Image (cartoon, rainbow, N blue to C red):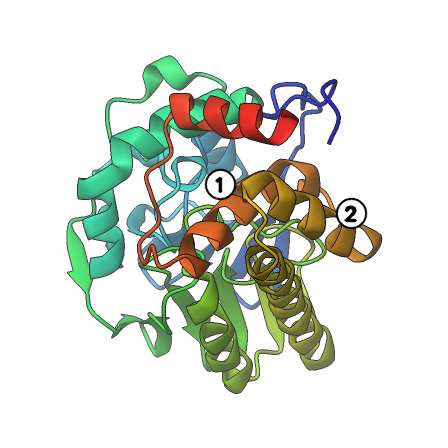
């Protein structure tokens, strides 16, 4: 990573227009090239959203595209986890939809939601067009511990916490009748895997639980939709491989007595040949190495990122 590369991705200015993609009858993905993906399910009398967009202005574009397939009201919003780029558009949906998350995500909002919001706006200015409209944090109305089901007529939307991973409260939305899985950022498809707020050593087990569902269609957190069982399994395996390579290189560095900068250099050398061409790889790697370094040194819970901490990390890595 050279000094000419913007650490906070402020140089990322290419707009990405999400595309509506039908995944199964009445099930849709809202898919970008490599920005965060969303989706929705059309029931008998309502629409259920899987995540929103980063700001109300961007969420209104999402709603306009939803309106090309249904005029039913958005009554429920499911949060796969809490990062500002996924949830801050919730206020754009009229009628005060019910917001559902895991208990882990609700705790996350209360403990670190504002700091996360402030940090993400600084890192990804392109993704927060119209940020001034955001009225405050998106706070869930209903939370669950491990699993709950929404019933849309005869269709079950099963919300499950399969374990810690990308965050402390990751939820996947599983539709058993058609084999569609919305994974949130637990699974990525050929995109850099952000682990700066993760429980990296737990994540592999969570991915095993995802694989056990045997999805036939998978909407990853970032990247193209996977549309057959083999492709879904491959995306899960690649995500797992990215994380295991990260951990192995940082563990090796710690064993050799390296500090954070040395561990970063080892990880970059080990991972760039295989993953370096993936979108957002250069952005996520410093945060990933920092979290892996903390976790392997016994810091169980991810430390809250602030703009100041972002800058300090960059100074250490630039050396």
Q: Which mark is residue 170?
A: none
- Tag 2 secondary structure: loop
The residue depicted at 66 percent of the width and 60 percent of the height is: 225
From this viewpoint, is residue 187 visible?
Answer: yes
Task: Tell me residue 261's x, y (percent).
Answer: 60, 39
Q: Is residue 99 visible?
A: no
- x and y percentages locating residue 5 in the rendered image: 71, 23
Closest to the camera, between mark 2 and mark 1, is: 2
Figure quadrant of residue 262: top right
The residue indicated by pointer 1 is 67
Q: Note whether 193 is above or below 119 in the view shown.
A: below
Residue 287, position as x, y percentages in the image: 52, 41
288 with respect to 94 (left or right): right
Which residue lies most toward the right here?
273
Report which residue position mark 2 lands on: 276
Q: Residue at x 67, y 52 (%)?
A: 223
Tag count: 2
Where is residue 66 shown, x and y percent of the image?
A: 49, 43
Does 244 sit left or right of 46 as displayed? right
Q: Is residue 127 above or below residue 277?
A: above
Task: Kindly indicate the quadrant of the structure image that contains residue 229.
Answer: bottom right
Instruction: Kindly report the distance in space between the C-alpha atoms of the residues bearing marks 2 and 1.
Output: 38 Å
Snapshot quadrant of residue 217: bottom right
* Extreme residue toward the top, this view: 132
Position of residue 210 relative to residue 52, above or below, is below
Q: SS class of the residue under badge 1?
A: loop
Please tell me whether residue 51 is drawn above or below residue 84 in the rendered image.
below
Q: Nearer the viewer, residue 223 or 194?
A: 194
Which of the pair 26/220 is nearer the observer? Answer: 220
Name the residue nearer the viewer: 116 or 144.
Answer: 116
Quadrant position of the N terminus in the picture? top right
Q: Decide which of tag 2 and tag 1 comes sooner along the chain.
A: 1
């Amino acid at each position: 990573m050279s000094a000419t590369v913007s650490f906070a991705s402020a140089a990322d200015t290419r707009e990405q227009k999400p595309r509506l993609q039908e995944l199964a009858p009445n099930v849709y993905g809202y898919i970008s090239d490599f920005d965060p993906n969303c989706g929705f399910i059309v029931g008998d009398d309502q629409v259920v959203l899987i995540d929103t967009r980063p700001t109300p202005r961007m969420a209104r574009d999402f709603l306009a595209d939803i309106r090309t397939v249904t005029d039913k009201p958005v009554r429920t919003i499911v949060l796969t986890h809490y990062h500002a780029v996924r949830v801050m558009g919730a206020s754009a949906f009229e009628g005060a939809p019910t917001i559902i998350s895991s208990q882990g995500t609700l705790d996350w909002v209360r403990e670190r939601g504002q700091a996360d919001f402030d940090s993400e706006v600084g890192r990804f200015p392109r993704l927060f067009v119209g940020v001034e409209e955001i009225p405050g944090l998106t706070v869930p109305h209903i939370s669950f511990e491990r699993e709950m089901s929404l019933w849309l007529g005869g269709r079950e939307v099963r919300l499950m916490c399969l374990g810690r991973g990308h965050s402390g409260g990751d939820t996947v939305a599983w539709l058993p009748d058609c084999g569609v899985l919305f994974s949130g950022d637990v699974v990525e498809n050929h995109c850099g895997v952000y682990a700066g707020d993760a429980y990296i050593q737990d994540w592999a087990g969570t991915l095993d639980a995802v694989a056990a569902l045997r999805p036939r269609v998978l909407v990853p957190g970032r990247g193209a939709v996977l549309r057959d069982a083999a492709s879904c399994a491959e995306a899960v395996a690649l995500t797992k491989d990215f994380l295991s390579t990260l951990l192995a290189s940082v563990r090796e560095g710690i064993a050799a007595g390296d500090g954070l900068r040395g561990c970063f250099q080892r990880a970059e050398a080990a991972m760039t040949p295989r993953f370096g061409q993936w979108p957002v790889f250069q952005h996520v790697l410093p945060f990933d190495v920092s979290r892996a370094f903390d976790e392997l040194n016994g810091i169980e819970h991810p430390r809250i990122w602030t703009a100041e901490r972002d800058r300090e990390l960059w100074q250490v890595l630039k050396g």
